[in-house]
Amino acid sequence: MKEEISYVDGKFLSNSKAEISPFDLGFTRAYAVFEFLRTYNFKPFLLDDHLKRFFLSAKILGIKHQFKKDFIKNIIFKLLKKNIKLKTELNFRIFLTAGESNDFLFSLKPKLYILVTRLKPLPQSFYLKGIKIITKNFHRDFPQAKSTNYGILLKYLKEAKERNSLEVLLVNDEEILECATSNFFAVIKGKIFTPPKDKILEGITRKFLISLIKKYRFSFEERKIYHKEIKNFDEAFITATNKEILPVVRIDNFLIGKGRPGEITLKLLEIFRKEINERY
């Protein structure tokens, strides 16, 4: 199988040759930010939005760097050309690390990595039957920044997998926030709700979907959602770059609706994919 080509600190290399220094603060301290995006018809999905959030994440975490938006976009388009023979949709993971440090605290030169992998779509059964998720009491430090510090979240995701669930819904002081790798929406009596963006990572797919919800005139509100409301959910779903709109049919021991994807969720997924096909 032909190997993917990635960008590794100034060089284009096959993935098997990609390396990171053990002195990089991204490795020793998880001091790094990243973005994850995908292609549709070999075109990057909402690239400018992803890069805007990427630079915001770096600013929030205080990683000062020399990289410009056009420079990164140029690399991504070069990577598209270098990987065109793969003949498949791609994922891009853009990493900005704080760089190497001799004292394991401070560095002078951040480093850029853009890793390319083949897109692996989720099973169609997830969309037809819905998924299960679990809840955990947790909130992120600097939630608006997409950092690589996923330690506790990976622990929770492992537990979710052991419980035959796909995601972890984060709750803080009884307030539902977001999932470990997704944003969360609920439907109650025909109205769509999602937590406000001030305490979460504002997902690119979330933002795009909200624009469609408003365009197609669904009843919608951004407001705080509480754990005690789960029993009232008629539908629930999560959004993410690699999940699109994914129906949720069980949260812990709570069956959502009738235990199958809801009408509004499926309609939104249909609209989402229709808009993608028209634009890409």
Image: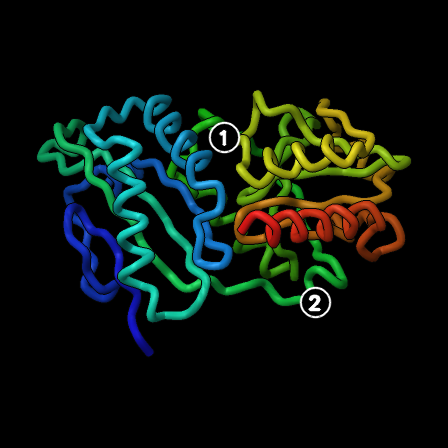
Residue at image position (61%, 50%) is 278
Residue 137 on image: x %, y %: 61, 35
| Residue position marked by numbered label 1 in the rendering | 140
Residue 243 on image: x %, y %: 59, 52
For label 2, the crowd category at 10 Å Cα-Cα, with few meaning under 14, some 14 to 19 and many 20 or more, is few
Considering the numbered disc 1 on the image, is that residue within a helix, a strand or a loop? loop
Residue at image position (19%, 56%) is 12
| Residue position marked by numbered label 2 in the rendering | 125
For label 1, the crowd category at 10 Å Cα-Cα, with few meaning under 14, some 14 to 19 and many 20 or more, is many
Residue type beneath disc 1 = Arg
Compared to 105, does 84 lie above or below? below
For this rendering, which residue is in front, 136 or 183?
183
Q: Residue furthest front?
A: 278
Residue type beneath disc 2 = Ser
Residue at image position (54%, 31%) is 202
Residue at image position (65%, 53%) is 273
Look at the image and tell me in which quarter the N terminus lies: bottom left
Residue 242 on image: x %, y %: 53, 53
Q: Residue furthest bottom?
A: 1
Within the image, what quadrant is residue 170 found in?
top right
